[in-house]
Image (cartoon, grey):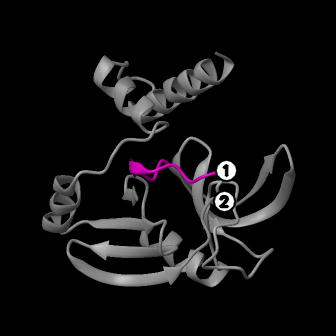
Amino acid sequence: MIKYWKARSTALVTALLLTGLSGGINSINLDRAIAQTTSRTIRSQDIEKLRRSGQRWIEIRLRSQRLLAWQGNQLVYAVVVSTGKSATPTPTGLFNVQSKYPTGRMQGEDYNVPDVPYIMYYSGNYAIHGAYWHRSFGIPISHGCTNVAPDHAAWLYRWASVGTPVVVR
């Protein structure tokens, strides 16, 4: 129950930010914000719509441990990543980059990492970010985030903006 209320309050804050604090919250915005903290199945129509759109979007492929940056149907960048291990999986679904930070601290029950570079949150506390503390890219070892080598994370951080779609499958 506590997790539900934490997610609900996070979604409310996200909805407030999405509406600019002054526009008020309607149920559509709140539902969209809540959807950013939950997973949903990716449909082939979602991928086709992104490919036809011409817009920038990010695809994270869990099975192959790859991150692909697309502009419509044109692949512009590809990199090996480390996603969540089986005990702490990376959530699947269609999300959007919600916020970006050049550096930050990431903490959990069994980790506390300062100066994490190039953070792009896309679902609650899940993010794409640089990882200077390991070189095990290609192996799922994270607590659910998508770890990228710092130089690749820098490129992605500059390329993507808040609102960029993120497909995790």
Q: Does the image show residue 20? A: no
> Vertically, is 39 above or below 52?
above
Q: x%, y% of residue 168?
A: 42, 58
At x 58% / y 55%, what residue is drawn?
A: 127
Q: Amino acid at mark 2?
A: Lys
Give the class, few, some or many, for how many residues have Cα within 10 Å of label 1's Cα (few <14, many ≥20).
Answer: some
Magenta span: chief secondary structure: loop
Q: x%, y% of residue 71?
A: 26, 74
At x 70% / y 66%, what residue is drawn?
A: 141
Q: Quadrant of the N terminus?
A: top right
Indicate the secondary structure of the residue bearing disc 2. Answer: loop
At x 54% / y 27%, what residue is drawn?
A: 13
Indicate the secondary structure of the residue bearing disc 1. Answer: loop
Q: Does the image show residue 21? A: yes
74 relative position to 63: left or right: left
Residue 95 magenta-drawn? yes
At x 86% / y 54%, what residue is drawn?
A: 112
> Vertically, is 4 above or below 141?
above
Q: Kindly identify which residue carries mark 1.
A: 88
Q: Quadrant of the C terminus?
A: bottom left
Residue 119 magenta-drawn? no
Give the class, few, some or many, for how many residues have Cα within 10 Å of label 2's Cα (few <14, many ≥20).
Answer: some
Marks 1,2: beta carbons within 8 A: yes
105 relative position to 151: left or right: right
> Vertically, is 58 above or below 166?
below
Q: Kindly identify which residue carries mark 2.
A: 85
Asked where in the image residue 26 lies, by quadrant, the reply is top left
Q: x%, y% of residue 70?
A: 31, 74
Magenta residues, start to end: 89-98
